[in-house]
Image (cartoon, rainbow, N blue to C red):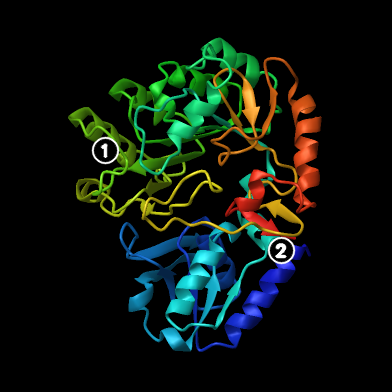
Amino acid sequence: MGRGTEYLEDIISYARKNEYTAIYGAGKVATGLYKDLSEAGINVACFIVTSDTGQPAEIRETTGGGYISAPVFQIDKVPHLMETGIVIGVSLGKTAGIKNKLEEYGVSNYVTLSQDYIDTILEEFKEPKLEITTVIGCAVNCRYCPQKLLSNRYWAKDREREREMSFETFRACLDKLPRNTQIYFAGMAEPFLNKECMHMIQDAVKKGYRVGVYTTCVGLGIEDCRNLVKMPIESVILHVPDEEQYARILLTEEYWEVVALLLNATKKDGSSFVDSGSCQGTPLGRFMELNNGRIRVESYLHDRAGNLPSEGVKLESCDYINGAIYCYHSGSRLDHNILLPDGTVVLCCMDYGIEHSIGNLLESSYEEIIHGKALNDIRAALKDETRRILCRKCTYAVRQ
């Protein structure tokens, strides 16, 4: 029995001591926990969310015994809140904000999950991951994305660096990656602003890589979209327009046609082609009408490890974290990295200031980068609080 499975036994024991049990969260961690608890005979009364905007009315999951379902309630609408034992079912990087919310409501009867147990749910975190930034200078320029910082740092010393990744650069870098690497077209800009993006996706799929796409749909045309939904894409997350217009998505009729095509598409197993949505504010009403409950839309804003000023809006952030730490997404492996258009590899999706450039795939092998001095120095700094690294201001950092 693994450490994650042993920890589940502790959660089951906790649940049995309470009159009601609820899970705070409604994403992959929460639904994975829900299935595990249900199969152990625990009746989960409901899911709790901070805001029910963009959330389904209930969550329904398939188990060996058929279907299970539980309602989703905004925290101020939870029946018997003070008599409920709450399991915080989110990634550890989001736990602090939820604890604060529970304490606002006077709730102290809650437990959190261990990283070992979360790893049993989120298998994808165990594999190396490379996010592809296909362009520098994202035209969408969402309010809560540090694009100016990225552009300034990228061109600070060399104004001739490639703005758009060429297909040749992508292929040369792809051919150096282990076959178990997850390739995500996301990175630090809208991937479809690069006209070669679909060509790159097709190449990665053809070579057998697990592929994910995070997109605002800006730059994704109808024909490319029709081709995309036929492909075995592992994960698709839509960046959703908001009522406040923080995400500066041009809402053309072609955009709405593309969104409708994506939302109506299914994978081979019959599940929704789009896994979820992410929003920088209140999801736009027209999108939510079109969505009609198909996907969950979450609004989670953080300060990108201190790289984004709050500008009067409360962003998830953390103080400097002391002691030995590790990354929630990649442990101490630190192998969830970002590829920039000229082949440069930077530490992670928080490093918009390019503080930690760890190599270049056009000049080095993947193994040389992953086991190289730059990344080894960062790994050492995870254990030494006196050494300044981006990770110590990151909401995904976890104390050991």
> Which labelled disc corresponds to residue 371?
none
- For the point 56% across and 39% down, which residue is it? 349
Q: Secondary structure at mark 1?
A: helix
- Foreground of the two, 82 or 272: 82
The amino acid type, in three-letter code, at marker 1 is Ala
Q: Which quadrant of the structure image shows residue 41? A: bottom right
Is the N terminus in the top left, top right, bottom left or bottom right quadrant? bottom right
- Foreground of the two, 185 or 9: 185
The amino acid type, in three-letter code, at marker 2 is Gly
Is residue 89 visible in the rendered image? The answer is no
Q: Secondary structure at mark 2?
A: helix
> According to the image, label 2 marks what residue?
4
Compared across the picture, whether 149 is left or right of 380 comes to: left
Residue 146 x, y percent position in the rendering: 45, 38
Compared across the picture, whether 355 is left or right of 69 comes to: right
- The crowding category of the residue bearing disc 2, from other C-alpha atoms within 10 Å (few below 14, some 14 to 19, many at least 20), is some
Above or below, 65 against 139 in this view is: below
Question: Sequence-wise, which precedes: disc 1 or disc 2?
Answer: 2
> Which labelled disc corresponds to residue 260?
1
Q: CA gap, disc 1 to disc 2?
A: 39 Å
Residue 147 x, y percent position in the rendering: 44, 33
Compared across the picture, whether 230 is left or right of 375 comes to: left
Residue 162 x, y percent position in the rendering: 52, 14
Above or below, 158 against 241 in this view is: above
